[in-house]
């Protein structure tokens, strides 16, 4: 019998059921973020904003696919109702008027970029959490998670620069 001594901490294990809930909640967010990024790229097609968002939108979709693959590796089933909820939440977010009923408001890109940035912040926290768990869960690749966290931080930086560019159009008058 292996009884921990005063100098030896008891072994800790990842709670599979709670990890499943956590990952499915992030999958719902990743689904909404992927939809939002694609929608913005289409909505602002032909603009500098769309050109800057295209690679970020592609990475966000890749990150979602990576999350699904990680869930599969961890034997965590994707809950379709949470995926659906992520899609619905993103579409409901499009209904805000931002002060205009018929055409897009200058506030729209600013608010959409802020929402996307917040989503990427959540994704950064996800990758960091999984990286922290990699010491206890051998099915998690620390190098991959380090890469994903660094990419998410870079995405945040790009989205913040794009958001700040929108300030003039959205809130400053001539």
Image: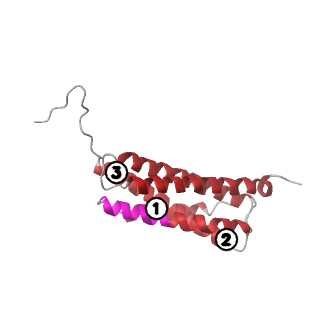
Q: Which residue is mark 2?
A: 43
Task: Name the secondary structure under disc 3.
Answer: helix
Indicate whether residue 69 is drawn in magenta.
Answer: yes
The N terminus is located in which quarter? top left
> Reading the chain from its start, which is encountered first: label 3 or label 2?
3
Task: Name the secondary structure under disc 2.
Answer: helix
Which mark is in front, 3 or 1? 3
Q: Residue 19: which numbered mark, if any?
A: 3
- The single residue placed furthest to the front in the displayed view is 143
Relative placement, left or right, of 169 versus 55 is: right
Name which quarter of the figure residue 166 lies in: bottom right
- The single residue placed furthest to the right in the displayed view is 174
Count residues near mark 3 (Cα–Cα under 10 Å), then give few for <14, some for 14-19, many for 20+.
Answer: some
Which mark is in front, 3 or 2? 3
> Residues in magenta?
62-74
Q: Residue at x 72, y 74 (%)?
A: 46
Q: Residue at x 69, y 73 (%)?
A: 45
Q: Residue 85: which numbered mark, if any?
A: 1
Q: Residue at x 48, y 56 (%)?
A: 147
Relative placement, left or right, of 24 versus 112 is: left
């Amino acid at each position: 019998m292996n009884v921990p001594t005063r100098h030896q901490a008891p072994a800790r294990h990842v709670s599979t059921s709670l990890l499943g809930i956590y990952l499915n909640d992030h999958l719902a967010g990743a689904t909404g973020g992927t939809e939002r990024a694609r929608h913005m790229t289409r909505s602002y097609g032909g603009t500098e904003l769309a050109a800057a968002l295209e690679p970020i939108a592609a990475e966000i979709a890749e990150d979602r696919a990576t999350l699904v693959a990680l869930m599969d590796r961890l034997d965590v089933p994707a809950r379709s109702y949470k995926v659906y909820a992520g899609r619905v939440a993103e579409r409901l977010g499009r209904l805000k008027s931002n002060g205009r009923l018929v055409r897009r408001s200058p506030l729209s890109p600013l608010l959409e970029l802020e929402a996307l940035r917040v989503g990427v912040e959540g994704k950064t926290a996800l990758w960091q959490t999984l990286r922290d768990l990699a010491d206890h869960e051998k099915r998690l690749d620390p190098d991959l998670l380090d890469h994903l966290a660094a990419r998410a931080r870079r995405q945040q930086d790009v989205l913040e620069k794009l958001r700040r560019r929108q300030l003039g159009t959205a809130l400053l008058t001539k």
